[in-house]
Amino acid sequence: MDATLDTELADGAAVGREISDGTRTLPVILVREGGQVRAYLNSCPHAGVRLDWRPDDFRDYTGHYLLCAMHGALFEPSTGHCLAGPCRGARLVALGSVADSATELVIRDVEKLPSSALFRR
Ligand code: FES
């Protein structure tokens, strides 16, 4: 199952959206870096909460890393790898491949998300 989002992402943008895998509604982070879009479950590996403290606010003060607003974990946007903070060495859960055009993104194989992925509202 694929999820299609009517979303345009400028280079460097990181936004939050919700998608469905057929049974669950899942919050995701979409990041465009260097022309490539990546999608991660919006769930911090430390405590399972969403990273953003307000909508579409995922970047740290440098504008380079993704920041978990709860306890300050920093993530590399191109890999989801946690570089600093209480879950250092862990990773954001990456969603399947993302195909993008000028006006829409298609996240492939959404149903393959691990059921054990942490998620709390
Ligand atoms: S919940 Fe994200 S760093 Fe603690």
Image: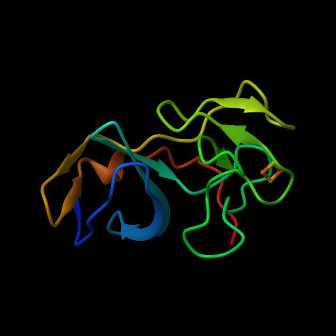
Residue 46 location (% of width, % of height): 79, 45
73 vs 78: above or below = below
State the quadrant of the N terminus. bottom left
Residue at (53% x, 41% y) in the render: 93
Side of 90 relative to 102 (left or right): right
Residue 89 in view (yes/no): yes
Marker count (numbered)? 0
Side of 104 relative to 114 (left or right): left
Q: Residue furthest top?
A: 89
59 vs 53: above or below = above
Residue 1 in view (yes/no): no
Residue 69 location (% of width, % of height): 77, 59
In this rendered view, identify the residue nearer to me: 58 or 45: 58
The quarter of the picture where residue 103 lies is bottom left
Q: How is the image coloured?
A: rainbow
In this rendered view, identify the residue nearer to me: 121 or 39: 39
Residue at (43% x, 56% y) in the render: 13
